[in-house]
Image: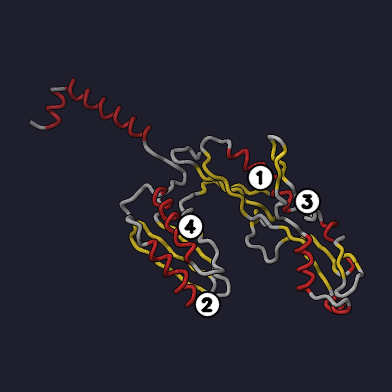
Amino acid sequence: MTLTRWAIENNRVTWVLLAVIVIAGLQAFNNMPRAYDPGFIIRTAQVVTYFPGAAAERVEALVSSPIEEVVKELPELDFVRSESRAGVSIVSVNIRESYTAMRPIWDNLRRKVDSVAPELPDGVTQPEVNDDFGDVYGIVVGLTGEGFSFKELDIIADEVKAVFLQIPDTAKVEILGVQEERIFLEYNNARLADLGLSPGLLTQILEERNIVVSGGSFKLGDERISLEPSGNFESMAEIGATLLRLPGTNQLFQLRDVAQLNRSYVDPPESLVRVNGEPAIAIAIAMRDGGNNI
C-alpha cells in the first residue's frame, strides 16, 4: 500500500496531521527570534594599562606579565595574549566557546585585575577592563545643522539621545563625532623672555589659580555644608583677567597682556562624521535582546 493510497483512505487522519503541521509551523514562525542586526556573544576582553615613559621591555616585565599571571587563574580561560608597547600594555583575555553567560566572568576578571593593581610599579595607571565589544548598532542617525556649531549640535544630540533611550526596545545610544572644545593660549616667546617668564612658568601659574579640589565641609546641626574654594575659571574672560606677577618683582599684569586666548576644537580631531559631505554628529542606536529593530 502506497503512502498516497493510505492518506486517501484515511483522510480524517491526514487532515488532522496537516492541521497539526500548519499550527506548529505558525507557532514556530511567531516565536522565531529575528533582528535586523542580530547580536552575538563576544568572548574576548582587553585589559589596557598605561605606563608613561617606559620602554616596551619594561612594560612587558613589570605590567603585562603580572596581569597575565593573575588572568590565568580564571577557570573559564581559553588563552591569553599580551602586547607590550612603549608606555602601554594590552592583555587580551579569551574565554572558551562553551560559556555563554559572560557578565559573571568579566566581573571575576575585574576583581582579579584589581587585586594585582597595587603590586604594579609607581606611575602605572589603573588597569582598565574593556569587555564592550558585542554591541551592534542597527540604526545610525546623522545630525546636521547649517549655521550650528559642533557645540550646539552636541547639545541637540544629547536631547535626541534622551528621547531614543525612552523607547522600550533601545538598549544603548552612543553619540559619535563630537568635537572637544579647548581654550588655546597663543603667546610670543620673545615677549615672555622680556618679562622673565617661560611657557612652563606660565602653565604653573595657571594651574595654581584654577582650583578644582574640594574645600572640605562642616556640620551645622543636621546638615552638612560643603565648602567650594573660589579661583576656578568659569569663562574665557576670567582666564584672560588672571593676574600674574613678574618673577622677583611686585609688578602685576593680566594674562591677556602677554597671550591671546582663542576658543576652538582639538586639532587634529579624534573622529569626524560627515553626512552628504556636511559636518555632522552620528547617533548610533543598539537594540535590546529580543527587541524589534524595525
Local packing at callout 4 (Cα closer than 10 Å; few below 14, some 14-19, many 20+) is many
- Closer to the eye: label 2 or 3: 2
- Tell me what residue is drawn at x 68 percent, y 34 percent: 222
- Tell me what residue is drawn at x 87 percent, y 63 percent: 243
Amino acid of disc 4: Val
Pointers 4 and 3 in contact (C-beta within 8 Å): no
Pointers 1 and 3 in contact (C-beta within 8 Å): no
Local packing at callout 2 (Cα closer than 10 Å; few below 14, some 14-19, many 20+) is some
Disc on res. 129: 4
**Residue 126 in picture, x, y percent from top left:** 53, 61
Local packing at callout 1 (Cα closer than 10 Å; few below 14, some 14-19, many 20+) is some
Mark 2 highlights which residue? 55
Q: Is residue 34 above or below residue 41?
A: above
Give how far apart the Cα atoms at labels 2 and 3 are: 47 Å
Q: Is residue 3 above or below residue 129?
A: above
Pointers 1 and 2 in contact (C-beta within 8 Å): no
- Tell me what residue is drawn at x 67 percent, y 41 percent: 159
| SS under mark 4 | strand
